[in-house]
Image (cartoon, rainbow, N blue to C red):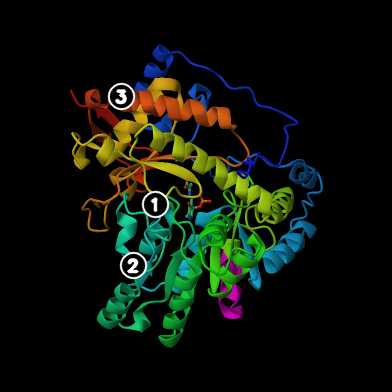
Amino acid sequence: MEKRKRSWAEPYKMKMVELLKMTTLAQRKKALQEAGYNTFLIHSDDVYIDLLTDSGTSAMSDRQWAGMMLGDEAYAGSRNFFHLEKVVQEVYGYSYLVPTHQGRGAENILSRILIRKGDIIPGNMYFTTTRLHQELAGGKFEDIIIDEAHDPENEFPFKGNVDLSKLEKLINKYGAARIPYVSIATSVNMAGGQPISMANLKELRAFTKKHKIRIIHDMTRVAENAFFIQQKEKGYDKKSIREIVREINSYTDGATMSAKKDALVNIGGFLAVNDWDIFEEARNMVVVYEGLHTYGGLAGRDMEAMAIGIEESVSKDHIKARVGQVLYLGNKMLNYGIPIVKPIGGHGVFVNAKKFLPHIPQENFPAQALAAELYLDAGVRTMERGIVSAGRKPNGENYFPKLELVRFTIPRRVYTQAHMDVIAESAAIVYDRRKKIKGLKMVYEPKYLRFFQAKFEKLQ
Ligand code: PLI
C-alpha cells in the first residue's frame, strides 16, 4: 500500500490575534510615494502582510509573556540576567555573556575590542551592520564565501560554506597577524538564508587553529542553520537541533547575537565569548555604549523572555514548522515560475530581481523597484537586498553585489499558510506585468546603512 502523506502543522494555537488593516490601491500609491519608494519608510498601518524583516517581529509564546511579568528590574544583578546567562551557557555553550540592546550593539563592542586599523576581516558574505562596524573600527571586510553563494540558480545545499583557498590567499597576502578573526554567519542572510555545513566549519576550525586565528560566529539564525544540517548533512539526521547548535558553536570562539530573530524576542542581543580577557574588556566597554554588564540596554523582563525564547527556538517542532512555512511559500512561488534564490533558505524567500526585471540595469535599483511594486499590488511589504543595501565602500564607490534580491522575510509564529497563499498569488500577479515595471533613481542618500532611509523617484 502506498504510504499515506502526513502534513505538519504549527505546533501552537492562537490565544490572541492582532487585526490587520486592508488598504485600497489609491491608499497604497499615496503611501508609497510619500515613502519615496522605500518600503522601510512606509507606515506599518499602511501594510497588510509585513515581510520587511524577521527581526523583532516574532510572536512570543504565553510562557515568554509570563516571563515578562517576572522581570526583575534591579539596576544591577537582575535575576533575569543570571537566568539568561545559564541558558546561553547550556544551550549555546559559550562561557561568558554580555547582553546588548540588539545585535549591532554586540558587533560594535566586539569590533572595537578585536579590530585594529588596517586589519582584514574575512567572512562568509557581508552583512550590513556587521561590515559597517568592522569598517568603523578600521578594518576591511573580505568575502570568502564559496562562489556558488553568488549564483541564485546554484542548488548546492550549503551555500554558506567558506572557500578555504580564498582564506589562504588572504593569509598569504596580509599575514595571519592582520586577521583578528574570521567572521562566520550561520544561515547567511545576504545569500538568501543559506546554511554552512558542519564539515566546512570543522575544516575551517582546523585551518584557523593552525594560523592562530579566532572564529567569531554571527549566531543570529543558528537554529535554522542547524535544521538544514539535520535534514541534509550526512550523519546528523538522528541528532537534535540542540545538539547540532552546540556542536556548531563548539567550533567557534565567540558570538554576536541578534536575539530578535532565532531567539523569538522583540528586542535584545548579546556578545558571548570563551576568552576571559575579551569578556573582561567587553564587560567594561558595555557600560559605555549599552548599560551595566548585567542588563546591557535591556529591561530584566526582556532578558527573561529571551532566556525562554532561546529554549523554544531549539525545539524540534518549532524549527520544523518555522522553516517549513518558508519552504511552503518558496515552493509556491517556484510553481508560479517566479525566479527565486535556490535552495530556499531558512528565514525568507529571496526573489532574484535581476531575472525578474532583466530590462532594469542594476544602477536603477531593480530590487528596490520590485519591492515597491509588490507593496502596491496587495500591501505586502518586502525589502531590497541588492545594490542599495550593499551601500558604498569606505572610498565612496558603490558596491555592485552580484545578488540583486527582494527578500520576503517570514516572521516566526505570526502568519498562517493562508497568508503564504495570498503572498505568492500577489507576487505572481506582479510577475505577469513585470515588463511594465520601471526603474528608480535615488534622490536622497544617507551616509550610513542607506537602505533604511534612502528616497527614490520613479524613472519615466
Ligand atoms: O538588527 P540587530 O542589530 O539586532 O542585528 C544585526 C544583525 C546582525 N547579523 C545578522 C545576520 C542580521 O540579520 C542582523 C539584523 N538583521 C536584520 C535587521 C534583518 O532584517 O535581516
Quarter residue 429 falls in? top left
Left or right of 370: which side holds 435?
Answer: left
Q: Nearer the viewer, mark 2 or mark 3?
A: 3
Mark 3 within 8 Å of ligand 1, using the beta carbon: no
Which residue lies under the disc numbered 3?
Answer: 432
Which residue lies under the disc numbered 1?
Answer: 190
- The answer to which of marks 2 and 3 sits earlier in the sequence is 2
> What is the number of the mark on residue 144?
2
Confirm or deny contact between disc 2 and disc 1 (CB under 8 A): no
**Residue drawn at (77%, 58%) of the image:** 78
- Separation of disc 2 and disc 1 at Cα? 14 Å
Give x and y (percent) for residue 323: 55, 47
Q: Is residue 216 above or below residue 5?
A: below
User: Which kind of residue does numbered mark 3 sit on?
Assistant: Asp
Query: Judging from the image, what secondary structure is the residue with disc 1 in?
Result: helix
Farthest front residue? Answer: 1
* The N terminus lies in quadrant: top right
